[in-house]
Image (cartoon, rainbow, N blue to C red):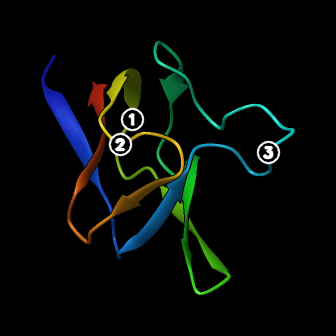
Amino acid sequence: MALKTIHAPLPGVFYRRPAPDQPPYKQEGDAVAVGDTIGLIEVMKTFTPVIAEAAGRVVKFVAENEEAIMAGQPLLEIDG
């Protein structure tokens, strides 16, 4: 299987969970289907979901939770 990388669609702050008291959308080793939400990007108090465009299993997150990111920056790798 080939590694696929999901990139940030816009700059902002990357969040792996919907709220601080809730579990992450996905963890390393989790299955991912096309259309799954894998995180949020916040820009000026507006939250945009990051949607998986590929299916597979999460190999690793490249971006950390609450990390400032740039558009096009890798967020995670999927083996699929």
Callout 2, which amino acid? Ala
Indicate the quadrant where residue 56 lies: top left
Q: Position of residue 73 (x, y in %)?
A: 22, 58
Task: Name which residue type carries label 3.
Answer: Pro
Label 3 neighbour load within 10 Å: few <14, some 14-19, many 20+: few
Residue drawn at x 58%, y 43% as measured from the top left: 16
Q: Nearer the viewer, residue 79 or 75?
A: 75
Badge 1: residue crowd in 10 Å (few <14, some 14–19, many ≥20): some
Secondary structure, mark 3, is: loop
Mark sitting on residue 20: 3
In this picture, residue 42 sits left or right of residue 54: right
Name the mark nearer the viewer: 3 or 1.
Answer: 3
- Residue pointed to by mark 2: 63
Residue 3, quarter of picture: top left
Mark 2 or mark 1, whichever is nearer to me: 2
Residue at point 53%, 51% (across, down): 66
The N terminus lies in quadrant: top left
Which residue is under mark 1?
Answer: 55
